[in-house]
């Protein structure tokens, strides 16, 4: 569901954001005139950009596992899929509101926009984008990437303990090499990495048509403070580990979908929007959603370079489970350890991710899929879900 509306409990999410249009009082003068005449305002209908088939595909892909899937049209920002599991039945709110709120599984939390998770290696896309776009590296530059290095006095290893030798950014993304990106992060510095994070939409809430209190900010948090404190570039942090998606970095699925969509759209971030058009009581179109560019993030050249690397991730790297027949897919996997182990109720505390887009050379859909508390990896748990959603949207 994307919201509910009841007299006793108010409204939420999309219903709350668009309440004035839904109840028919967005035209103040018309509403006053109707009130003087003793007439109730006539509400409008809002058509969303959500694709029902892809929505069901995402829900079935999660198969009851806690997680989220967000899919965007990269060229317009239209939200095509937004699924959060476990879900709740909006019709049960009047009778089960207290129980739903107290449920430890948190079904009333929209995991797509409210829940924050460590992104793992999916964040390496942001690091690579910052390095290429700022001119810190060229696509052919290499960094010696051994199996283990010391970062701020603590050892950091590659996931497979492989010594990759001298590799470039494409090879590092394809094999998700921690020691490459940690060194690259230290070379970039916190200032440059934070600058590009902000361009991609981190450090502020998404510009989505949902109430602000039902969205969370992606960024680096001091978790020792109750509720967490969002850190800035002036705060001390381990930039090497930040560059590989660690160091107290927490993100929402909508944010990672925006990262994929930005690369897919040649470096331009479009404002994400759920609504598509507003219809009056007679079914006539009153207004339609106009795509709106939110920011210029990276150059088209940088986006093309990242796309080629992301194609290799799916064709020969960690993301092969996201491959589609006859369609080139660009993507990146991620597997992160969940810091709050208690919430996994005995499950393996991994957060599995896949972000990507298709077709790689003419992107129609960008997606982020994540699964909580899994024994598997991003390439085995999240990538197949993302693939099925991309296929459903391309088929539609």
Image (spheres, rainbow, N blue to C red):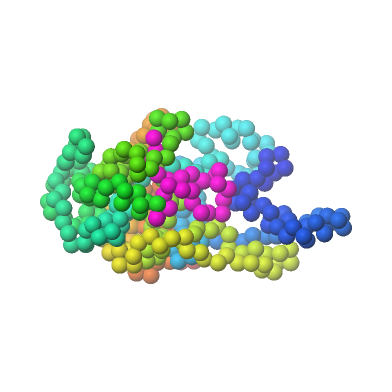
- Magenta highlight range: 199-222
Q: Is 349 situated left or right of 30 in this image?
A: left
Q: Quadrant of residue 329?
A: bottom left
- Residue drawn at x 58%, y 59% is 275
Position of 387 relative to 245 (above/below): below
Position of 318 relative to 65 (above/below): below
| Residue 211 shown in magenta | yes
- Residue drawn at x 72%, y 54% is 23
Residue reaching furthest to the front = 234
Q: Is 201 situated left or right of 299 in this image?
A: right
Q: Quadrant of residue 346?
A: top left
Q: Is residue 52 visible?
A: no
- Residue drawn at x 67%, y 67% is 286
Residue 364, given in percent of the width and then of the height, sits at: 43, 66
| Residue 234 shown in magenta | no
- Residue drawn at x 52%, y 66% is 291
Residue 133, given in percent of the width and then of the height, sits at: 29, 60
Residue reaching furthest to the right = 37
Number of numbered labels in the structure image = 0
Q: Is 128 situated left or right of 93 in this image?
A: left
Q: Main secondary structure of the magenta part?
A: loop
Q: Is residue 202 visible?
A: yes
Residue 59, given in percent of the width and then of the height, sits at: 49, 50
Q: Is 94 situated left or right of 377 in this image?
A: right
- Between 199 and 250, the residue placed more toward the observer is 199
């Amino acid at each position: 569901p994307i919201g509910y509306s009841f007299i006793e409990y108010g409204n939420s999410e999309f219903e709350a954001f668009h309440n004035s249009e839904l109840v028919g009082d967005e035209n103040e003068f018309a509403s006053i005139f109707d009130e003087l005449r003793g007439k109730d305002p006539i509400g409008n209908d809002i058509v969303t950009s959500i694709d029902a088939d892809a929505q069901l595909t995402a829900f079935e892909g999660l198969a009851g596992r806690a997680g989220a899937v967000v899919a965007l049209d990269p060229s317009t920002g239209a939200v095509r899929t937004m699924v959060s599991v476990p879900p709740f039945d909006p019709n049960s709110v009047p009778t089960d509101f207290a129980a739903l709120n107290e449920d430890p599984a948190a079904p009333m939390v929209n995991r797509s926009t409210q829940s924050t998770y460590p992104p793992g290696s999916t964040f390496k896309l942001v690091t690579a984008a910052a390095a290429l776009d700022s001119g810190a590296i060229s696509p052919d530059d290499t960094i010696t990437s051994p199996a283990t290095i010391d970062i701020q006095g603590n050892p950091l290893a590659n996931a497979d303990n492989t010594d990759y030798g001298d590799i470039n950014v494409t090879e590092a993304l394809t094999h998700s090499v921690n020691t490459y990106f940690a060194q690259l992060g230290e070379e970039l510095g916190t200032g440059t990495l934070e600058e590009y994070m902000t361009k991609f939409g981190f450090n502020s809430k998404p510009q989505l048509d949902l109430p602000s209190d039902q969205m969370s900010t992606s960024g680096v948090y001091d978790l020792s403070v109750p509720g967490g404190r969002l850190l800035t570039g002036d705060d001390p942090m381990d930039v090497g580990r930040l560059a590989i998606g660690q160091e107290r970095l927490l993100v929402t699925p909508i944010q990672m979908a925006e990262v994929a969509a930005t690369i897919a759209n040649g470096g331009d971030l479009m404002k994400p929007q759920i609504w598509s058009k507003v219809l009056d009581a007679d079914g006539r179109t009153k207004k339609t959603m106009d795509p709106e560019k939110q920011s210029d993030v990276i150059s088209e050249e940088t986006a093309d370079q990242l796309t080629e690397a992301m194609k290799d991730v799916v064709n020969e790297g960690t993301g092969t489970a996201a491959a589609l027949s006859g369609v080139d897919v660009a993507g990146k996997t991620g597997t992160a350890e969940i810091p709050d182990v208690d919430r996994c109720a005995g499950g393996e505390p991994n957060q599995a991710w896949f972000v990507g887009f298709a077709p790689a050379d003419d992107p129609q859909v960008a997606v982020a899929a994540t699964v909580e508390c899994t024994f598997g990896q991003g390439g085995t748990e999240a990538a197949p879900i993302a693939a099925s959603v991309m296929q459903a949207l391309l088929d539609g």
